[in-house]
Amino acid sequence: MKKIKYLLVFVLLTLSLVLASCQPAAEAPAEPAVVPEEPAVVPEEPAVVPEEPAEEIPADSQLEIFSWWTAGGEAEGLNAMFEVYSALYPEVEIINATVAGGAGANAKAVLATRLQGGDPPDSFQVHAGLEVEKYEPSTYLQPIDDLLDPAVFPQDLLDLLLYEGHYWTMPVNIHRSNVLWYNPKLLEENNIAVPTTMEEFFAACETLEAAGLIPIAMGTKDGWEGAHVFESFLPAALGADGYRGLWTGEVSWNDPGVTQALEDFLTMMEYVNEDHSALTWDAAGEYIIADQAAFMIMGDWAAGWFASKGYADFGWAPPPGTDGIFVALSDAFSLPKNAPNEQAAIHWLEVAGSKAGQEAFNPAKGSICARIDCDNAAFEVVPETYLYLTSAAEDWASDAIVPSVVHGAAAYESWATDFKDVITLFVTSGDVARTQSDLADLCVAAGICQ
């Protein structure tokens, strides 16, 4: 700093001499100019401070999670897992990027556009199974073989997760697609036992309808619900092995069992609420809570939804004809290539696959852990779902496990989407022969059937 001060003094003296030499001639001053003995005080900082660059957001300070969990227990479960993550990584801001629409129909369309446009979220929800093919894993995803520990997951689930020799997604739960929910009060008041066969089911519906009640609550507004319900009718008519064979080409879609499933489904539609096309599945579920409807066929996320509504007076059973058959699906999360916050995403997958993460998530979601080492006591935190989830865990361990098509496990996404569209049309047309023919054509188009 002293050198700077002396330099400034030298510059000032030189400048004064130059200025003096440039002045016009004038009379000499009476007194000579006095040079100050001490140099002028110069500020230590320059007069103009350069503008500081804009502060950049540190890498991995955010985490964008993309899913379709927007309502009831599913949203509560996701938030519970966020809390586990935030406790470990409090410096990371979580962006909950949800797109409404049951079964992810709307979210998947948005996600495909983002991936193709080079704008992936840090992690996104995927159903375990062949649904992953939709996202062209070798192009858009990173394998997570080093993150997933096969020792803590059941073999049935590992078989679903493995695709082209790699694990691409981290599972967070096991869901059951085929559940018959019922209102015990209405069954008791009308002397109806929980039906186990289609004949008993339709007889119960006749009794309930005669009593002025809605026998079966159903919503088909989002376009996937009809196919979801029909998914339970296929194993009821074909059995577990026959149902599996439909997706492998070992059983023909022209099989009489498929005809029976379509006819039974058509009969069931005679007993659903008339406004089903205007309602989502959960809006239709309000009829159960209000003691206006007796039955509803829906996946076990309904248990989490019931709990979120403060409703615990529900009963459950396998849909008629499916006792001993567990139609399974699993929610999972991926690691996209070029994730903006890759390390934060890796930490998210570690939490999603952890015991703590799954014990926080599943009680509210209405699902059981994907891991095999979760503590049953952890599920007591949501008493409305505890008994059901205990029962579901027992069934998972003993039932024949078959994959859900509507929820991404049994078939490629393109086939599953077309399947939903065919059944959606069947809900309005009721044309059994045409629908069965269309389903057979889909199997051929998928390259599975000849």
Image (cartoon, helix red, strand yellow):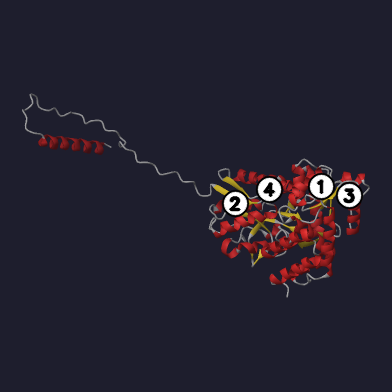
The front one of 296 and 67 is 296
> What amino acid does circle 2 point to?
His
Hey, which residue is sitting farthest right in the picture?
A: 191
Q: Secondary structure at mark 3?
A: helix
| In the displayed structure image, the side of residue 291 where residue 62 appears, left or right | left
Q: Are marks 1 and 4 in contact (CB under 8 Å)?
A: no
Q: Are marks 1 and 2 in contact (CB under 8 Å)?
A: no
Q: CA distance from mark 4 to mark 3?
A: 46 Å
Q: Which residue is mark 1?
A: 387
Residue at image location 78% in from the left, 53% down from the top: 298
Q: Which residue is mark 2?
A: 347
- Label 3, residues with CA under 10 Å away: few <14, some 14-19, many ≥20: some
Q: Which residue is mark 4?
A: 356
- Compare marks 4 and 2 and give the one earlier in the sequence: 2
Where the N terminus falls, by quadrant?
top left
Q: Secondary structure at mark 4?
A: helix
- Label 4, residues with CA under 10 Å away: few <14, some 14-19, many ≥20: some
Q: CA distance from mark 1 to mark 4?
A: 21 Å
- Compare marks 1 and 3 and give the one earlier in the sequence: 3
Q: CA distance from mark 1 to mark 3?
A: 30 Å
- Label 1, residues with CA under 10 Å away: few <14, some 14-19, many ≥20: few
Q: CA distance from mark 1 to mark 2?
A: 32 Å
- How far across and how far down the image is residue 343, in percent? 55, 53
> What amino acid does circle 1 point to?
Leu
The front one of 161 and 198 is 198
| In the displayed structure image, the side of residue 347 where residue 210 appears, left or right | right
- Compare marks 3 and 2 and give the one earlier in the sequence: 3
Q: Looking at the image, is mark 1 or mark 3 nearer the viewer?
A: 3
Q: Which residue is mark 3?
A: 209
